[in-house]
Amino acid sequence: MNRRYAEKATVTALILSSALVLAGCPNQNGTATIRYEQLGACNGFKEGNNVVSSGPEAAYVLFKIHWLDNTNGKVNFAYDPARLFVSSLNTKPNLTTTSQLTQKIGALATVATTVPAGKNLGHGGYAVFIVPTANSSDPQIEANKTNYMLSYDNPTSNPGVLMDKKNSSQTQYQGVQDCLTKSW
């Protein structure tokens, strides 16, 4: 019993010392926060007689960027949505260039903007990513059971960037096969 206690105490001490080391290395430019939310996934949509698809083993995953908060930044935050990527994927950045999907669902795509130091900005833009799935006739089902986290490939001239996912504990999302049959 004492050995288990000692092992737990050692692990706890290592975690706390790691947190202190990280806290001791703040970004000299301050910190900006990107607040976002995962909305769900879909497979594609019809465009006239054509079908626009995410692919046979992939799904579109939609996110909404709510706020770009630079109140703790010491320099302007040059937000570039092309620097967003899904953390669990091996490629970055991987934001799809299919802003056509956001237009079709009646939403605005997330756009580049500069947030002055000490300010925050309501954003409301949508980001769409193509994520790989298992071989399935309905890939959005798998994607809607996955909690995807976004990261930001930040240049050193920016404040440090924290990603704040509004629904980070959610593990099930409402999706559809046809992206245009849902109000996102």
Image: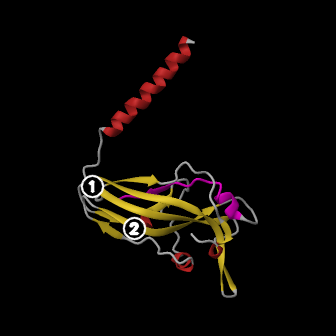
**Circle number at residue 73:** 1
The answer to whether 91 appears left or right of 71 in the picture is right
- Give the percent coordinates (x, y) of residue 164: 43, 53
Q: Is residue 49 above or below residue 144?
A: below
Query: Magenta segment: does it hold 134?
Result: no
The answer to whether 102 appears left or right of 13 in the picture is right
Quarter of the image that includes the C terminus: bottom right
Instruction: Residue under label 2, please give it.
Output: 123
**Circle number at residue 19:** none
Query: Magenta segment: does it hold 143?
Result: yes
- Give the percent coordinates (x, y) of residue 50: 68, 84
The stretch in magenta equals: 139-154
Quarter where residue 58 is shown: bottom right
Measured in 3D between alpha carbons, the distance from the residue under mark 1 to the one under mark 2, in whole angstroms, is: 17 Å
Q: Nearer the viewer, residue 169 or 49?
A: 169
Quarter of the image that includes the N terminus: top right
Q: Which residue lies most toward the top here?
A: 2
Q: The disc labelled 2 sits on which kind of residue?
A: His
Residue at horizontal 43%, vertical 31%? Answer: 15
Residue at horizontal 55%, vertical 56%? Answer: 89
Q: The disc labelled 1 sits on which kind of residue?
A: Gly
Q: Mark 1 or mark 2, which has the lower sequence index?
A: 1
Which element is circle 2 on?
Answer: strand
Sort mark 1 into few (<14), some (14-19) or many (20+) by Cα contacts within 10 Å.
many
Q: Which of marks 1 and 2 is in front?
A: 2
Which element is circle 1 on?
Answer: strand
Sort mark 2 into few (<14), some (14-19) or many (20+) by Cα contacts within 10 Å.
some
Q: Is residue 39 above or below residue 50?
A: above
Q: Disc 1 vs disc 2: Cβ atoms closer than 8 Å?
A: no
Residue at horizontal 47%, vertical 73%? Answer: 109
- Give the percent coordinates (x, y) of residue 9: 47, 21
